[in-house]
């Protein structure tokens, strides 16, 4: 019986989430909104995340460089460090790490903010005043995320590559010009494009899940649960969609 | 005029409203009174269309809001309704000025300078001034309530609903809020609906009232009719006594 309930709840959740996604897309396309609200969200979601993304992507670049160098040493091919770091970052780690950072930082905060508004009747107040909460609160966050994520990912890629270069320079004495020449000669437009498309998809996932979870709580203890659910479910969905998109790009870009 | 006809609402197995009916006439102050958890807030939320009752009808100026197909139709009716929420529901990321002028800028697209002037005038009406740039968390409970009232009256709705207007307000500020509600009612000749469990406050303001107990209306009429009533449940409530037919668990 418990299992039946869980299955029923799962499908109910997916159903409600699908209706919510449809509403967000419709309001994003047809709703009117102020540039001021959009800018406020872009600053919070995008610009305020730059510091954390810089730090983490830089260290990830160093880590990948060391791990790659360890393998390449076996074949005495350390010279290929630059392309391998660049490809790992642009195709995979940049979008995924960037999205996980944004899901943990901004997604959790979006859920907490909307959840607090829900339990203090602010969402009801919007509704009664004839201001559609999805248009006023959710659509700007969705737009901000799909605009910010590709920029954050390019930024993360750059700092990751820079981290990789430090390893190349100090450990293998690879010079700056040569390292970046190797990097850019290995990168194809499809590598960058697939990373950017992934980042837009992951940004949408964060927006949908964090806002949807934010609109669910009925009490303050529910807000805490919703924030946890928001981060955990965003992580799961990002990884699942990463797998699907990686397979998809592998076949269409071969 | 608002006419509520036989509305019922359950959450799961728990019946919150059970065939509730009453009428609120234009221009009167109507009190919905009952103990905490009696279903008052659910009833109020049904009247503004935030909750759809399981059965029954709610007529506002002749239109049954439970039968409206489109949200736009409901929003059209809501343009004449303002609600002051129990916890004030002020937007905490906006300043007091932005809160009070919210509907003017978001819905009516009125120019900034005009909004600023109307916000100033409305805040003066509720006894506040020079607080436009403060955030709600910087205000006292009484001031928050006044700002919440200002946010509603700025667009001059015909019906104003107050959900527990004196809850979370310091005892010394309660009288001021009551006087303010009375003054605004007279000044704008609106229909006021007050939902409260505070009998003293309620009876001071109301022309007529409905008594809600266990999801049912057990009395509807004037204050004098209430005082003459010999229903033991009402008498117990009026006395504020723990002894009587209403048990602690019964709501």
Image: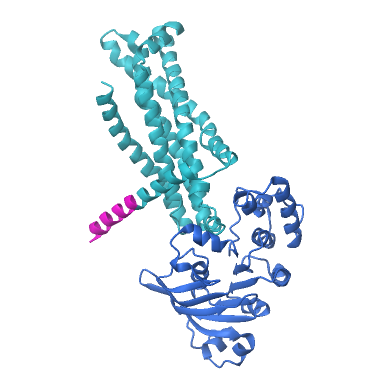
Chain colours: A cyan, B blue
- Relative to A187, say whether B160 is above or below: below
Picture quarter containing residue A181? top left
Q: Is residue A89 visible?
A: no
Q: Report the front residue among A191 and B104.
A: B104
Q: Is residue B1 left or right of residue B176?
A: left
**Of residues A200 and A47, the one drawn nearer to the viewer in this rendering:** A200
Question: Secondary structure of the magenta portion, mostly?
Answer: helix
Picture quadrant of residue A166: top left
Q: Residue at x 41, y 38 (%)?
A: A204
**How many labels, in total?**
0
Residue A146's spot in the image, x, y percent?
45, 35
Decide which of B59, A21 is in the foreground and name it.
B59
Q: Is residue A121 left or right of residue B155?
A: left
Q: Is residue A26 visible?
A: yes
Q: Is residue B79 above or below residue A83?
A: below
User: Which residue does the image show at 52% across and 58% down from the upper left?
Assistant: A124
Q: Position of residue A222 (x, y in %)?
A: 44, 55
- Quarter the C terminus of chain A occupies: top left
At x 35%, y 13%, the residue is A186
Q: Is residue B53 left or right of residue A126?
A: left
Q: Is residue A238 shown above or below B7?
A: above
**Which residue, as the protein is rendered here, is positioned at the far front?**
B62
Considering the image in quadrants, where does the N terminus of chain A appear? bottom left
Q: Per the image, is A117 magenta?
A: no
The percent coordinates of residue B223 (x first, y second) are 63, 85
- State whether residue A127 is above or below residue A96: below
> Residue B175 appears in which quarter of the rendering?
bottom right
Q: What residue is drawn where x is 50% and y is 55%?
A: A118
| Residue A7 counted in the magenta span | yes
Residue B221 percent across, percent down from the top left: 58, 85
Please give the range of residues in magenta. A1-15
């Amino acid at each position: 019986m418990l299992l039946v309930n869980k299955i029923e709840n799962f499908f109910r959740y997916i159903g409600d989430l699908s209706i919510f996604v449809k509403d967000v897309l419709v309001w994003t396309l047809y709703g009117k909104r102020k540039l001021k609200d959009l800018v406020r969200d872009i600053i919070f979601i995008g610009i305020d995340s730059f510091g954390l993304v810089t730090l983490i992507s830089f260290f990830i670049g160093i880590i990948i460089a060391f791990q790659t160098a360890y393998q390449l040493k076996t074949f005495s091919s350390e010279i290929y460090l630059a392309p391998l770091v660049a490809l790992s970052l642009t195709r995979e780690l940049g979008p995924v790490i960037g999205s996980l950072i944004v899901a943990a930082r901004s997604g959790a905060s979006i859920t907490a903010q909307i959840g607090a508004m829900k339990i203090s009747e602010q969402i009801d107040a919007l509704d009664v005043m004839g201001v559609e909460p999805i248009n006023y609160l959710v659509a700007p966050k969705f737009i901000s995320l799909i605009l910010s994520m590709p920029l954050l990912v390019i930024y993360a890629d750059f700092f990751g590559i820079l981290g990789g270069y430090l390893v190349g320079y100090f450990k293998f004495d690879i010079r700056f010009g040569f390292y970046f020449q190797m990097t850019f000669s290995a990168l194809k437009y499809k590598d960058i494009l697939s990373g950017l498309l992934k980042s837009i998809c992951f940004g949408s996932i964060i927006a949908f899940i964090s806002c949807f979870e934010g609109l669910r709580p009925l009490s303050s203890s529910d807000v805490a649960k919703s924030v946890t659910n928001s981060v955990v479910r965003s992580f799961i969905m990002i990884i699942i969609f990463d797998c699907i998109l990686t397979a998809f790009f592998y076949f269409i870009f071969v | 005029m608002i006419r509520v006809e036989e509305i019922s609402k359950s959450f799961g197995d728990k019946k919150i409203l059970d065939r509730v009916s009453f009428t609120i006439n234009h221009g009167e102050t109507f009190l919905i009174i009952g103990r905490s958890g009696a279903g008052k807030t659910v009833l109020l939320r049904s009247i503004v269309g935030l909750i759809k009752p399981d059965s029954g009808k709610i007529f506002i100026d002749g239109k049954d809001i439970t039968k409206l197909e489109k949200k736009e139709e409901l929003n059209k009716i809501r343009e004449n309704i303002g609600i002051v929420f129990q916890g004030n529901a002020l937007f905490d990321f906006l300043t007091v000025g932005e809160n009070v002028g919210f509907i003017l800028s978001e819905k009516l697209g009125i120019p900034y300078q005009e909004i600023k002037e109307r916000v100033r005038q409305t805040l003066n009406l509720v006894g506040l001034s020079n607080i436009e740039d403060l955030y709600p968390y910087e205000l006292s409970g009484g001031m928050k309530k006044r700002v919440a009232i200002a946010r509603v009256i700025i667009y001059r709705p015909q019906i104003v609903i107050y959900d527990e207007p004196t809850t979370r307000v310091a005892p010394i500020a309660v009288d001021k809020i009551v006087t303010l509600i009375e003054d605004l009612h007279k000044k704008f000749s609106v229909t006021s609906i007050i939902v409260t469990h505070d009998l003293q406050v309620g009876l001071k303001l109301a022309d007529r009232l409905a008594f809600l107990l266990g999801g049912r209306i057990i009395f509807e009429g004037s204050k004098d009719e209430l005082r003459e009533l010999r229903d033991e449940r009402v008498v117990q409530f009026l006395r504020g006594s723990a002894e009587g037919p209403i048990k602690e668990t019964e709501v």
